[in-house]
Amino acid sequence: MRRTLILTKILILYLFIVSVQSKYHSRSLPYDSEEAKVTNLHFVLHETISGSNPTVAMIAQANITNNDNNSSVPFNTVLALDDILNIGPETNSEVIRNAQGLGVLIAETSTTNLLWFWDFGFITGKFNGSFISMFSRNLTTAMVHELSVVGGRGKFRMAKGYAQIQDYIQNDTIIISELNVTVIHY
Ligand SMILES: *[C@@H]1O[C@H](CO)[C@@H](O)[C@H](O)[C@H]1NC(C)=O
Ligand SMILES: *[C@@H]1O[C@H](CO)[C@@H](O)[C@H](O)[C@H]1NC(C)=O
Ligand SMILES: *[C@@H]1O[C@H](CO)[C@@H](O)[C@H](O)[C@H]1NC(C)=O
Ligand SMILES: *[C@@H]1O[C@H](CO)[C@@H](O)[C@H](O)[C@H]1NC(C)=O
Ligand SMILES: *[C@@H]1O[C@H](CO)[C@@H](O)[C@H](O)[C@H]1NC(C)=O
Ligand SMILES: *[C@@H]1O[C@H](CO)[C@@H](O)[C@H](O)[C@H]1NC(C)=O
Ligand SMILES: *[C@@H]1O[C@H](CO)[C@@H](O)[C@H](O)[C@H]1NC(C)=O
């Protein structure tokens, strides 16, 4: 009896897999851009550079001798990031969630660029469970940086837009940056 049940299950699973594999279809409909909304978000990013709980870690580095005068983050370095997003610049202000991603330090002629691949997640408010994907270089000489919003998930599906980011505090242990994000989504 049990065996039959298992066999039946396997058969059902098999049929299911087959039906999934053998079906290819597509359908195109007019694209309704009228339904798009624009959302502005404001929050603060907390990045701990050093100490016992850093939110950024170097994961790979090219072995090059001319490394920008022994800078702690020389050219050709890959960083892993898990920064905290808060509503304000105080470390104990309400947590919105985090920004996880990769940063790649690139040498472009004489200036250093940070290339960000960033995924911003939210656990509070109406965007709880939604994410914004950003991808941009951060030219290390500018005061206010712009990041491109290249996509999103959850309520931010099909997102596009931009973010402006500015340092509030930057020292050897912490970078606290303010962000204004403008996102068009559905
Ligand atoms: C780094 O490069 C230098 C100079 O080319 C070489 O002597 C050294 O062995 C390299 N170190 C590693 C860990 O590959
Ligand atoms: C490295 O340091 C030297 C001497 O202090 C300076 O002349 C040079 O411009 C520095 N290079 C970079 C890339 O900062
Ligand atoms: C970088 O550090 C190494 C080892 O400490 C030292 O030999 C070298 O002179 C330093 N280079 C510069 C440009 O400061
Ligand atoms: C956010 O969503 C999660 C999962 O659905 C839920 O457990 C949590 O309570 C929500 N948080 C807020 C503040 O609404
Ligand atoms: C972007 O570059 C600026 C200038 O070097 C720096 O102050 C800022 O902390 C960087 N932004 C981030 C998010 O790392
Ligand atoms: C964010 O917007 C606020 C209010 O308009 C403004 O005061 C602040 O300077 C902006 N910050 C950035 C980094 O754009
Ligand atoms: C960096 O700034 C934070 C926040 O103001 C402060 O708590 C910390 O002591 C500072 N660290 C250094 C090395 O100045």
Image (cartoon, rainbow, N blue to C red):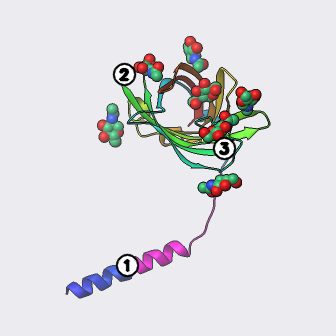
Q: Which is nearer the N-term, disc 1 or disc 2?
A: 1
Q: Secondary structure under badge 2?
A: loop
To which residue does mark 2 refer? 93
Q: Residues within 10 Å of mark 1 (few under 14, many from 20)?
A: few
Q: Secondary structure under badge 1?
A: helix
Image position, residue 152 (x, y; %): 55, 41
Residue 69 seen from this side = no
Q: Residue at x 36, y 24 (%)?
A: 94
Image position, residue 73 (x, y; %): 60, 37
**Closer to the eye: label 2 or 3:** 2
Is residue 21 inside the magenta stretch?
yes
Question: Mark 1 belongs to which amino acid?
Answer: Ile
Tag shown at residue 31: 3
Q: Which is nearer the N-term, disc 2 or disc 3?
A: 3
Q: Which is nearer the N-term, disc 1 or disc 3?
A: 1
To which residue does mark 1 refer? 12
Provide the residue span drawn in magenta.
13-27
Residue 39 seen from this side = yes
The majority secondary structure of the magenta stretch comes to helix
Disc 1 versus disc 2: distance between alpha carbons?
Answer: 52 Å
**Closer to the eye: label 1 or 3:** 1
Contact? badges 1 and 2 (CB < 8 Å): no
Contact? badges 1 and 3 (CB < 8 Å): no
User: Horizontal placement of 42 versus 73: left or right?
Assistant: left
